Image (cartoon, rainbow, N blue to C red):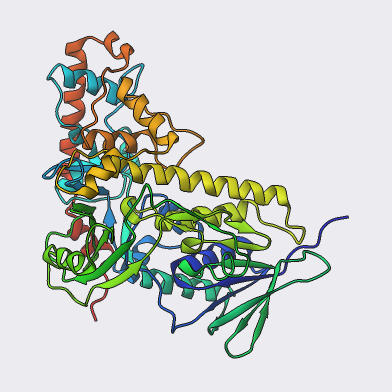
């Protein structure tokens, strides 16, 4: 006999996570399930100016979002990568650009030939072989031109900066048009089933007004509180602050300045780092720091002293603990967004983690049987995803040569997860990076950070020697020149926005 299908999906909490879940599910489920979002206007969200990674384009396409309209509605700008300042040594700068490095030459990857030529003194800096990095430095942007064949202009990878609260509002409008119901109200508690089918599952949430909202599947988007996944089901939390000691942030917007840069900036300070996210109408800024190494007042002073324009508000404090729920899906509750865990936004992965969780929920969408096997696989994937992003974030802290504060010395000398140590050892040996099980960050991302923070391999791939030295040099020089010409062809970032997707000014 077949197991009955679920009927009612209740999303607890709105914000970016709640409305991304609502938009995706209402698109995929096509009105055959009842979807309700319960949120309170009185409860604030953590959302700040958000930076994203290229996978968000896929989410927006799936839910039917027009890019230019989306950019106008969210005051968005385009993003080609992240600039890192002071992360290796004070004064160092490098870019983690999206997309590929160079063009493959023969047997091994492009960067292996570059490694060989660098040792011979015949290569330019790595950034000159990346169209994303060179376009960023020139403040240029255009989407890929697929009609240009093998040109680097056909392979431009990009993401977005946008106002997270406006994005949530935009997704809410889209979701409600597709039948999603919104209920305004504060949730006081949840009730669980007793005897019968699925004992222990959440059967309803109760609002301050006394209204009881029942459901079959609950999606917990209640933020750090974890109203259902933690407060009700007591799933437990795995703390990673011994690797990632920052536990606080201050966020503040400031006035815009020219040029409108097509990249996020992360500047390392004495006990943490500062983000800079350029939007059309303002710049989003924040200081992520360790309260064990710097006071709140010092952190605020550092943030305000390093703004590009006049602050538009007082710094807003955010407290957090880095780590993840021991289970992202328990019983009939799936945690999405901050309720499932937190990784600081150093590599702009916050919204991607929401997107990934929603996609996995769709892949393992349950019936009323709530298969333990399916839930276990969902949790395995969630853990793998969090742990591999965790490793990539730790890499930035651990791979520093700074000696100006206890914070950085402690990070440089700490033990790291075995999975990260394996990557470091492999790269030190022959400049190799192995991407396992389709982990989020590909080889090109790891290479840019390790090179940018001064990790030079002892040797390069021996097969890079099979190509003639002069021919290899000429090929690298040809790639560099083609990229430079492509960047010259690209329009200015601000001019592109003004022509295609400028937000209306109030």
Is residue 234 shown above or below 444?
below
Residue 356 in the image, given as x and y percentages of width and height? 50, 52
Q: Viewed as shown, does residue 224 lie left or right of 153? A: right
Q: Is residue 322 visible?
A: yes
Q: Name the image quarter holding residue 456.
A: top left
Is residue 272 shown above or below 412?
below
Give 458 or 180, whichever is nearer the viewer: 458
Is residue 115 shown above or below 359?
above
Residue 326 in the image, given as x and y percentages of width and height? 56, 53
Q: Name the image quarter holding residue 313.
A: bottom left
Q: Is residue 474 visible?
A: no
| Residue at the image point whose x is 37% and y is 47% from the top | 243
Q: Viewed as shown, does residue 157 lie left or right of 385? A: left
Q: Quadrant of the N terminus?
A: bottom right
Residue that protrudes farthest toward the right in the picture: 1
| Residue at the image point whose x is 40% and y is 60% from the top | 321
| Residue at the image point whose x is 56% and y is 58% from the top | 236
Q: Quadrant of the C terminus?
A: bottom left
Q: Viewed as shown, does residue 200 lie left or right of 408? A: right
Give 439 or 113, whichever is nearer the viewer: 439
| Residue at the image point whose x is 16% and y is 71% from the top | 255
């Amino acid at each position: 006999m077949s197991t009955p299908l679920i009927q009612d999906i209740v999303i607890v909490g709105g914000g970016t996570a709640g409305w991304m879940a609502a938009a995706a599910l209402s698109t995929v489920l096509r009105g055959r399930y009842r979807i309700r979002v319960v949120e309170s206007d009185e409860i604030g969200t953590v959302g700040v100016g958000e930076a994203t990674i290229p996978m968000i384009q896929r989410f927006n396409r799936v839910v039917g979002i027009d890019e230019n309209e989306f950019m106008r509605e969210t005051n968005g700008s385009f993003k080609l990568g992240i600039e890192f300042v002071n992360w290796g040594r004070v004064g160092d700068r490098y870019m983690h650009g999206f997309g590929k490095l160079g063009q493959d030459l023969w047997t091994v990857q492009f960067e292996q030939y570059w490694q060989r030529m660098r040792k011979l003194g015949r290569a330019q800096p790595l950034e000159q072989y990346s169209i994303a990095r060179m376009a960023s430095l020139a403040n240029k942007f255009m989407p890929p031109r697929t009609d240009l064949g093998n040109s680097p202009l056909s392979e431009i990878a990009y993401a977005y900066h946008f106002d997270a609260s406006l994005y949530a509002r935009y997704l809410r409008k889209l979701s409600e048009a597709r039948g999603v119901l919104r209920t305004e109200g504060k949730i006081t508690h949840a009730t669980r089933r007793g005897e019968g089918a699925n004992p222990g599952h959440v059967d309803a949430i109760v609002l301050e007004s006394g209204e009881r909202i029942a459901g079959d599947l609950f999606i917990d988007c209640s933020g750090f509180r974890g109203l259902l996944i933690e407060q009700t089901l007591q799933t437990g939390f795995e703390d990673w602050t011994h690797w990632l000691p920052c536990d606080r942030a201050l966020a503040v917007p400031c006035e815009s300045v020219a040029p409108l840069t097509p990249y996020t900036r992360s500047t390392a300070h004495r006990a943490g780092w500062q983000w800079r996210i350029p939007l059309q109408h303002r710049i989003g800024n924040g200081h992520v720091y360790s309260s064990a190494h710097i006071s709140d007042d010092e952190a605020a002073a550092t943030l305000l002293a390093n703004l590009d324009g006049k602050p538009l508000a007082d710094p807003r404090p955010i407290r957090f603990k880095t780590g993840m729920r021991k289970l992202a899906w328990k019983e009939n509750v799936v945690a999405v967004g901050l309720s499932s865990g937190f990784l600081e936004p150093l590599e702009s992965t916050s919204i991607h983690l929401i997107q990934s969780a929603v996609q996995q929920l769709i892949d393992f969408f349950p019936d009323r049987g709530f298969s333990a096997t399916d839930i276990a696989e969902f949790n395995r994937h969630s853990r793998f995803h969090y742990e591999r992003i965790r490793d990539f974030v730790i890499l930035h802290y651990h791979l520093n040569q700074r000696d100006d504060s206890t914070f950085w010395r402690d990070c440089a000398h700490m033990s790291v997860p075995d999975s990260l140590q394996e990557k470091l050892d492999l790269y030190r040996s022959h400049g190799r990076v192995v991407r396992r099980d389709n982990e989020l960050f590909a080889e090109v991302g790891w290479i840019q950070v390790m090179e940018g923070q001064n990790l030079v391999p002892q040797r390069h791939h021996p097969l890079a020697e099979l190509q003639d030295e002069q021919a290899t040099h000429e090929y690298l020089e040809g790639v560099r020149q083609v990229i430079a010409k492509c960047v010259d062809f690209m329009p200015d970032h601000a001019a592109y926005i003004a022509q295609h997707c400028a937000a209306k000014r109030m």
